[in-house]
Image (cartoon, helix red, strand yellow):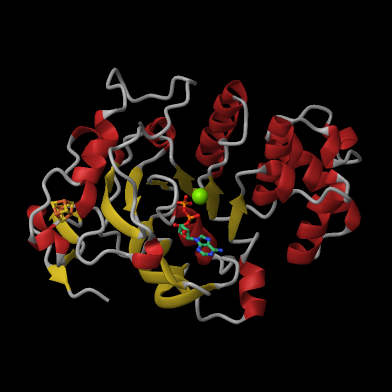
Amino acid sequence: MRSIPVSAADPAPLLAVEGLKVHFHTRDGVVRAVDGVDFQVAAGQTLGIVGESGSGKTVSSLTLLRLAPPPAKIVAGRVMFEGEDLLTQSDKRLAEIRGRRMAMIFQNPATSLNPVLSIGSQLTEILRWHTGASAKAARERAAELLALVGISDPVARLRQYPHELSGGMKQRVGIARALLCEPSLLLADEPTTALDVTIQAQILDLLADLRQRLGMAMVLVTHDMGVVARMADRITVMYAGRVCETADAVTIFNAPQHPYTRALLESVPRVDHSYSGARRVLPSIAGRPPDLLHAPPGCRFHDRCPEATAECRQVMPREHVVAAGHTVSCLRRGSPGESAP
Ligand SMILES: Nc1ncnc2c1ncn2[C@@H]1O[C@H](COP(=O)(O)OP(=O)(O)O)[C@@H](O)[C@H]1O
Ligand code: SF4
Ligand SMILES: [Mg+2]
């Protein structure tokens, strides 16, 4: 774990997500996928967002760039990034920011690259669109980026097509593409989940190295506690569309307060929390997350929580500061309640 002290009360975070609600209006009703989420990322910092499958991590991160697919509807909230609320900007302005100031790498490199365009075309088009670089300058820059992400013989690679590359290589190209314009924030949604275990470790090494060298901030979405332990400065734990707890990584691992965070950690080997190359998928906690089409009243974790009281079934806990830079949403940790939506 890195030990950069970062205050949650940073006066001007690079990214501040406030009260974000993203609902899916389906034929069966409203799915409250993201239902009042707050988090912040300071310049140069890595925030790990962790939680079981279906907790709203992907929908939250896609919404930062307004990429959540229909029928997703942004119902409330702000996404303040470099002083602008991305949720109220024009489509034109957002297209300028996407890929240039905030870029994304996806879980599956096989589907995130365009199969009919050469690697060179995919990279240079982005550069030329964002920066107006000449074809020659764009090719040079693209080759430079491929070298940066550890791809040998980059000039020859520019002529290749995605199907000619292995999964690990494709993900390196995806990372190069995201870094072309030197974004200040990189979003990485499960960037290693689709890869072999040995390749996962290499890609994480690469991301850690690039983050250090380029000084960029990162939002790293994962269900793997080993990955956040190794990469994140701060960690936000999500459950059923809500944030349970946010703190620096050392506090999350050594002094977690929320019963869900504790349950997650109890089943992770406590030798040390550095990434060993082995996958440590979130353990199964008895029970299942609630169906967000019929989100339960009160605390969304109450069915599985060993500490639940009658109040927990009625009152939804609101985020509450328990120490500097450490927030928890739990009625039994002092959180005030909010009336159910
Ligand atoms: N297209 C969709 N239509 C309806 N509900 C969706 C859709 N996509 C996602 N959801 C709902 O949003 C919730 C959060 O999904 P997601 O953000 O992908 O979770 P995570 O990334 O944490 O696994 C899920 O519980 C799912 O039910
Ligand atoms: S509010 Fe109640 S149910 Fe929810 S985590 Fe806290 S103790 Fe458990
Ligand atoms: Mg996901």
Residue at 30 percent across and 59 percent down: it is 10
Locate residue 109, reporting x and y percent.
69, 42
Vertical comparison of 27 with 284: above or below: below
Vertical comparison of 297 with 105: above or below: below
Locate residue 131, reporting x and y percent.
75, 63
The quadrant of the picture occupied by the N terminus is: top left
Residue at 66 percent across and 70 percent down: it is 96
* Residue closer to the observer: 12 or 186: 186
Task: Farthest residue to the front: give it.
Answer: 28
Q: Quadrant of residue 250?
A: top left
Vertical comparison of 79 with 50: above or below: below
Locate residue 304, reporting x and y percent.
23, 46
The quadrant of the picture occupied by the C terminus is: bottom left
Residue at 30 percent across and 39 percent down: it is 249
On the question of residue 325 being in view, the answer is no
Vertical comparison of 337 with 303: above or below: below
Side of 112 relative to 297 (left or right)? right
Residue at 73 percent across and 42 percent down: it is 110
On the question of residue 143 being in view, the answer is yes
